[in-house]
Image: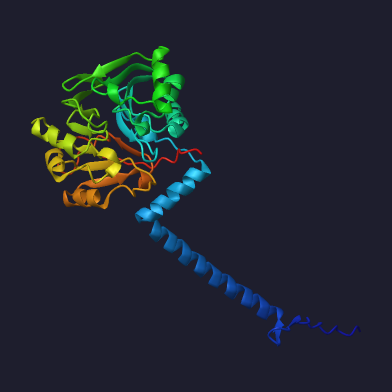
Amino acid sequence: MATPKTPRMRKRRITYNEGLGMLFTGEDLYERFVEQKQKLQIVVSLLLACLLFYSYFPAGKAMWQRLSHVAGLEKVSLTAKESPFSIHVLNVGKADAILVCCEGENLLLDTGTCDQGDKISDYLTAYQIKKLDYLVISHPDIDHIGGLAQILKEHGAKTLYLSALQEKFFGASPESLAAREMLENGRAIPHFLKAGDSFSLGGATLRVLAPLTEQESPNDSSLVIKLVYGDFSALFCGDIEKEGEAELVRSGQNLKSDLLKISHHGSKTSTTKLFLNAVQPECAVISVGPDRNQLPSREVLTRLENFQVKVYRTDVDGTVIFTQSGLESQDHRAPISFYMNYLLQNKQ
């Protein structure tokens, strides 16, 4: 009869750590590995929580926006494409470029600086805009006409609008000369607007409120345009300063608007209490970027806060879109609710 075999005992692997002068079994090492892994997971979770919390603040939003720019990400708002009405305040740094779309027609207000031409052109292409219905230049500063030549060349415009009181401010900058060359070559025939003029964009009406008189500064010579679509209104002020704002208020025109495009990128010389009291906006948007003047001014932001105005900034929020959603606003002033979408279209 065979003798039953005695079960062999498994040898436990023993590891000696010279640094610690300790003996570890395989089970000990595994337990230590699990413990360290759990600690690492806790640390990573805390870091992610801190990063998420930081992202709620303006500095955190700006950080993500810069990272998105570097990454070259692009996203088109499907809500905006499907909406009959939308206003796009493009993130073009300390400059202006505003796209308005209404019921199949489109308008571009200002063209940023020359180094933003590709970005603006790509944005128009992303929204399948081959040719603009209207291209409007508020005034001939380089941060408003810089991309004009490129936009006219790559997209063109059925109608180009300039101010009737700005001819003397077209200087000899490369941007101005390039724009003049495009006009002389027949890329677009300029039409000149003056206070009191109006035109239609789909179902929206745009009325020119200023300049009322010939101005000494190019900023106060900016075209000021009020857009009305149904019960919604928006006021675009170019770069007018306190003198231009005061003249507008004295004119007695109806300035009250739901949305205000803050003048001169949030400089303290604009957006006075007098002007805000006349406009009484629900929302405001500031087109601004990194700048030695550290705009927008703290004074302007404080004034807006005192008037309980909701503020959006392209340097923090990226490209900002306001679009019709078909919902009533809380105070029932307009069948428009403001919808903001972050578009990461800034390609380097």
**Image height check: is 75 above or below 302?**
above
Residue 129 shows in this picture: no
Residue lying at the far right in this picture: please name it: 1
Residue lying at the far top in this picture: please name it: 186
Residue at 45% over, 20% down: 153
Q: Quadrant of residue 249?
A: top left
Residue at 42% over, 31% down: 120
Q: How is the image coloured?
A: rainbow
Q: Is residue 119 left or right of residue 284?
A: right
Nearer to us in this view, 104 or 213: 213
Q: Quadrant of residue 99?
A: top left
Residue 218 shows in this picture: yes
Task: Residue 244 in the image: state x and y as whole percent.
Answer: 18, 34
Q: Is residue 282 left or right of residue 109?
A: left
**Image height check: is 48 above or below 266?**
below
**Image height check: is 146 above or below 267?**
above
Task: Residue 155 in the image: state x and y as whole percent.
Answer: 43, 20
**Image height check: is 166 above or below 265?**
above
Residue at 46% over, 39% down: 346
Task: Residue 39 in the image: state x and y as whole percent.
Answer: 54, 72
Task: Residue 136 in the image: state x and y as whole percent.
Answer: 31, 24
Residue at 45% over, 47% down: 66
Q: Quadrant of residue 198?
A: top left
Nearer to us in this view, 58 or 190: 190
Quadrant where the image shows the N terminus: bottom right
Q: Is residue 76 left or right of residue 237?
A: right
Q: How many marks?
A: 0
